[in-house]
Image (spheres, rainbow, N blue to C red):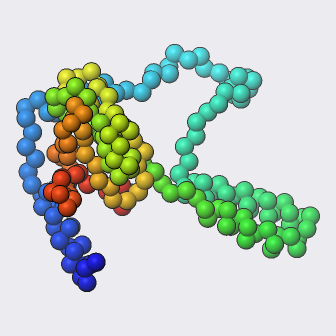
Amino acid sequence: MSEHPRENDDVFAERVASVLRAPERFDDDFERSLVDAIHSDRPIDRSTEPRRGALSFAWWSTPRRMDVSPVMALALAASIAAVAALGASNLAPARIAATTPSIVAQAASAPDTVTLVRFVFVGPAKSVSLVGDFNAWGADATPLHSTGVKGAWTVSVPVPSGRHEYAFIVDGARWVPDPYAPTSSDDFDTKSSVLMVGT
């Protein structure tokens, strides 16, 4: 390990900044291909489902998805703890002090944040896969799907916070780093793309 980690951080930051400062060069069809790829990946239209009133049994019995961030989960746990503490104060005031530490410990164990990252590959290919440290570099773990626009492939992957490296495997044989992301090289001078999530 280096004796000067601060200098290494500065060198890495300058490498990343130089890539970000460099002018981007795209072919004439890139913008159209990217916009078409984004437009073709639409969520399912749920406007055809019949609306149900909040007083109907079907509305209450239909499962619903609710996304909660770790901060909201912590606030919800704290609210439940406060209601429980207030209710218990009327019955047994001495029990509040004994139960509060365990409630605080449960609320503090919120899971790490995971971000859904959309990866897009634009180029001629018969198949494209995503490999990275977030899927154990498995060539078959995360295939990209054609968007229907010629040469546009995409996949969305949950990625934990932190620094990650990734690349695309094109046609099962060719290793291609993302041309629009900073790169990093390993000991064998194999280039991978760098992704920073939540920092």
- Of residues 129 and 150, the one nearer the viewer is 129
User: Is residue 32 visible from the viewing direction of this image?
Assistant: no
Which residue appears farthest toward the bottom when viewing the image?
A: 3
**Left or right: residue 11 compared with residue 79:** left
Which residue does the image show at 38% across and 49% down from the upper left? 136
On screen, residue 116 above or below 103: above
User: Is residue 71 visible from the viewing direction of this image?
Assistant: yes
Counting the numbered discs, the total is 0
**Left or right: residue 172 compared with residue 67:** left
On screen, residue 92 above or below 47: below
Q: In which quarter of the image is residue 154?
A: top left
Q: Quadrant of residue 17?
A: bottom left
Q: In which quarter of the image is the C terminus?
A: bottom left
Q: Position of residue 92 (x, y in %)?
A: 91, 68
Which residue does the image show at 11% across and 29% down from the upper left? 29
Which residue does the image show at 25% across and 84% down from the upper left? 3
Q: Where is residue 37 in the image (x, y as percent from the top left)?
A: 26, 28
- Of residues 63 and 50, the one nearer the viewer is 63
**Left or right: residue 34 compared with residue 138:** left
Q: In which quarter of the image is residue 107?
A: bottom right
Q: Where is residue 53 in the image (x, y as percent from the top left)?
A: 67, 23
Q: Position of residue 123 (x, y in %)?
A: 16, 32
On screen, residue 61 above or below 184: above
Which residue does the image show at 32% across and 55% down from the upper left? 164
Q: Quadrant of the N terminus?
A: bottom left
- Of residues 13 and 8, the one nearer the viewer is 8
Which residue appears farthest toward the right when viewing the image?
A: 91
- Of residues 192 and 147, the one nearer the viewer is 192
